Each structure stands twice: as C-alpha cells, then as structure tokens.
Image (cartoon, rainbow, N blue to C red):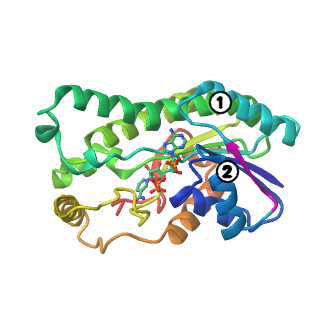
Amino acid sequence: MSSWVITGVSRGLGFELVRQLSEDPSNTIFGLVRDKAAVESKVAVEIGRKNIHIIQADTTDPIALEKAAQYVAEKTNGTLDYVMANAALQAKTALVGFDTLSRDPKGLEEDLIEHFRVNTIGPVHLFNAFMPLILKGHAKKVIAISSGMSDPEMTLKADIYQATSYAMSKSALNMAIAKFSALYREKGVLCMAICPGAVDTGILDIQTEADGQLAMAMFAKFKQYSPTFEGLGSAEDSIKSVLALVNKASVDGGYAGVFLSHTESKPYL
Ligand SMILES: NC(=O)c1ccc[n+]([C@@H]2O[C@H](COP(=O)([O-])OP(=O)(O)OC[C@H]3O[C@@H](n4cnc5c(N)ncnc54)[C@H](OP(=O)(O)O)[C@@H]3O)[C@@H](O)[C@H]2O)c1
C-alpha cells in the first residue's frame, strides 16, 4: 500500500503517472492541479478509478500546498510514501536564445523569474510542505522531474542555446534536490531528480510556421547532441521507465541527491 502526491496531473506526463500508478488498487494517488473540476471530470472519463484524489493547489502557492498536505494527512493518517514535483513551465521563449531575448530585458527578466517560480521555487515549497508526512512514510522518496537541458554538458556538446530560462530553472531544481538530500538523507529520505527523456506532450504548443521553424532548429540541435535521436517518445514508455527507476533507487544504492536520466545513462535523448 503506497501513497503518492504528484503535481501537474492535468495532462502530459503527470496524467500518465496517475494513469499508470492507479492501475494498482493498493496505491492511493493525490494529484495537485490548478483546475480541480476540469481534471476530476477528465480523470473520471479517461481513467475512472477510485484511488485517485484531485486537489486544488497552484504549486507556486505555499499556503495552498500546506492545505493540500493537511488534506493528504487526514486521508493517510499523517504519512506519505512518495512526493513528485512534475508540474513545470516551458514557455515559448524556450525556442530562442539570449540574443533574441535581450531585445526586451524586462521581458527576459520576467521570463526567468516565472520559470524559477514554477520550476524551482514551487518544488521547494512542495517538498517542505510534505516532508513531515514523508518522514513518517514507508518509501520516503522525494522526486523532481527535471530535464537533460539542465546539464551544461548537453548544452555544450551541441551548442544548444535555446530554452535558457527553462534550463537554468531545472539546473537550480537539481541543486535544490541535492540540498534536500543533504538535510534528509540520514533520516532515510531519498531525494532524486530524473529526466524523463524527450516526450510528445505538446509542451511547446507550436501554432505558427515561424514557431515550427524554431522548433525544427531545436530538434536539429537535439540530433547533433544525440545522433540516434529519432524524435519524441510516448508518455507511456517514458513513465514506465521513470517509475522503474523511482522503484529501484535507494539511499544505500548511491542515488541520494543525484540527477539522472530515466535510462540511467547519457545521452538524455
Ligand atoms: N515532455 C518532455 O519532453 C519533457 C522533457 C524533459 C523534462 N520534462 C519535464 O516533465 C514534466 C512534465 O512535462 P510535460 O511535458 O508533461 O508538461 P505539460 O504537458 O506542459 O504539463 C505541465 C503540467 O504542469 C502544470 N503546471 C504548470 N504550472 C503549474 C502551477 N503553477 N501549479 C500547478 N500546476 C502547474 C500544468 O497544469 P495546467 O493544466 O494547470 O497548466 C500541467 O499539468 C515537467 O517537469 C517537464 O519539465 C518534460
């Protein structure tokens, strides 16, 4: 019997996490979302299982996260096995580099702050809010869904100048995971960041021809970084391997505080 808190379950990889985990009736899944009514009806229609609870909480709002933790504690007798920071922002600014963004310094600053607010600071609030429950849980696993884009080695290998704010915010997330591990490893808590690979979730919402061309330029960089890269994979396959790694990883096995690909090897793509 395991309990899971996952953010950003309205769509994409978060929704797939809920779908796969809820297949096991002994799991209880708490999904945090920004539009509870919409996600509840989507879950009812597309998954339809009783072990899923949808909770309203913008992950950038620490008060909403504290309330969510109270709600979960009431249902689980104060414990939690897994917390996963999956919600993230990747704005269309991901398609260009600092040269283009520098034309609007105020906009660049806001883009950086918003990515950090959602992708770095939100997970920090999330982990703080749920850590008292995790410390009383059995599995004691704190997982951040990060990205290979956070790794300077990937950037430098193919001069990937795109996704500036996103990559910087995910690098900072990896460091946050290391810091949480530094605090809680000795108490048996595994804190770990995982890249799920490149997955077709419509994350960039390409609508114009110009954006399509910019996206193609980024994919060309991905191919240069990893010549075997053949395009985006499925959410189902990605989440299967992410969950296999979450299941396998342990403090004693050398996974404490690290950032790894879901395949445990590079390249990330
Ligand atoms: N897809 C990929 O190729 C890829 C590659 C590497 C890493 N990742 C990482 O994998 C994770 C999932 O990606 P995805 O492709 O599934 O993304 P996605 O389809 O864009 O979904 C993002 C989710 O985050 C939620 N969210 C955003 N801001 C939020 C906030 N302030 N509070 C609460 N929820 C918020 C969204 O909710 P709303 O519906 O309310 O907007 C949505 O559920 C992310 O951490 C991403 O960085 C993805």
Q: Is residue 143 left or right of residue 43?
A: left
Amino acid at dot 1: Ala
Where does residue 173 sit, x and y in percent of width and height?
45, 36
Return the mark for residue 269.
none
Q: Residue 237, image x and y in percent? A: 52, 71
Is residue 251 at all visible to an observer of this figure?
A: yes
Is 130 rendered above or below residue 45?
A: above
Answer above or below: position of 109 versus 143: above
Residue drawn at (65%, 30%) of the image:
64
Q: Which residue lies under the disc numbered 2? A: 37
Residue lying furthest right: 77
From the viewer's perspective, is 14 left or right of 213? right
Of tags 2 and 1, the one toward the viewer is 2
Look at the picture and state if 240 lies above or below 111: below
Nearest the eye: 204 or 1: 204
Q: Secondary structure at mark 2?
A: helix
Label 2 beta carbon within 8 A of ligand 1: no
Task: Please state the horizontal and vertical placement of residue 142, each as a whole percent of the image.
Answer: 62, 41
Which class describes the residues within 10 Å of circle 2: few (<14), some (14-19), or many (20+)?
Answer: few
Give the quarter of the figure containing the C terminus: bottom left
Q: Residues within 10 Å of mark 1 (few under 14, many from 20)?
A: some
In the image, the segment drawn in magenta is 50-55
Q: Is residue 20 left or right of residue 152?
A: right
Question: What's the residue at 12%, 41% (across, down)?
Answer: 100
Judging by the rendered image, the residue that carries numbered circle 1 is 64
Horizontal placement of 131 versus 86: left or right? right
Q: Amino acid at mark 2?
A: Ala
The answer to whether residue 111 is magenta is no
Q: Secondary structure at mark 1?
A: helix
